[in-house]
């Protein structure tokens, strides 16, 4: 079992509370269990974690995570299409 640093936990909580994504999605993206993330959220309070300059960075980080996720999905679709068309050659 991997032990996460306090900084990682606090960042995970901040993302869970500010990203607009479901906690399940945030947990999946970070590679932790949903119940673990929920436990961290109940332990760390948002008033300590989200500062104004940090909020802008958090929004940008989440936008980039979303863009990265979309690009990965598009890449997978293109891989499958390439395989399909390659198999259709006479």
Image: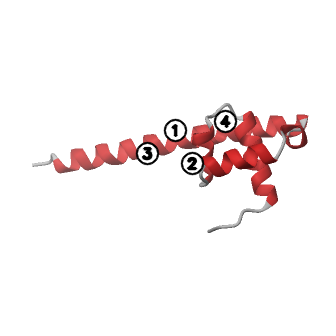
User: Which color scheme did the rendering employ for the protein?
Assistant: secondary structure
As helix, strand or loop, the secondary structure at mark 1 comes to helix
Height in image: 70 above or below 8? above
Residue 39 locus on image (x, y percent): 71, 48
From the image, tell me which residue sits under label 4.
63
> Which residue is most to the left?
90
Q: Say whether marks 3 and 4 touch (CB < 8 Å).
A: no
The 10 Å Cα crowd at callout 2, few under 14, some 14 to 19, many 20 or more, is: few
Quarter of the image for residue 17 reads top right
Q: Which mark is residue 15?
A: none
Which residue occupies 81% across, 35% down? 56
Of the residues under marks 3 and 2, which one precedes in the sequence? 2
Of the residues under marks 4 and 1, which one precedes in the sequence? 4
The 10 Å Cα crowd at callout 3, few under 14, some 14 to 19, many 20 or more, is: few
Which residue occupies 35% across, 48% down? 79
- The Cα–Cα distance between marks 3 and 2, rounded to whole angstroms, is 20 Å
Of the residues under marks 1 and 3, which one precedes in the sequence? 1
Height in image: 86 above or below 19? below
From the image, tell me which residue sits under label 2.
28
Residue 45 locus on image (x, y percent): 84, 41
Residue 62 locus on image (x, y percent): 68, 38
- The Cα–Cα distance between marks 4 and 1, rounded to whole angstroms, is 11 Å
Of the residues under marks 3 and 4, which one precedes in the sequence? 4
Q: Which mark is residue 75?
A: 3
As helix, strand or loop, the secondary structure at mark 2 comes to helix
From the image, tell me which residue sits under label 1.
70
């Amino acid at each position: 079992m991997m032990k996460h640093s306090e900084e990682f936990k606090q960042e995970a909580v901040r993302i869970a509370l500010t990203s607009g994504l479901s906690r399940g999605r945030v947990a999946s993206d970070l590679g932790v269990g949903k119940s673990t993330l929920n436990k961290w959220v109940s332990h760390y309070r948002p008033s300590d974690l989200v500062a104004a300059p940090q909020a802008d960075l958090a929004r940008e980080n989440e936008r980039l995570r979303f863009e990265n996720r979309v690009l990965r999905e598009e890449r997978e679709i293109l891989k499958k299409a390439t395989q399909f068309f390659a198999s259709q050659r006479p």
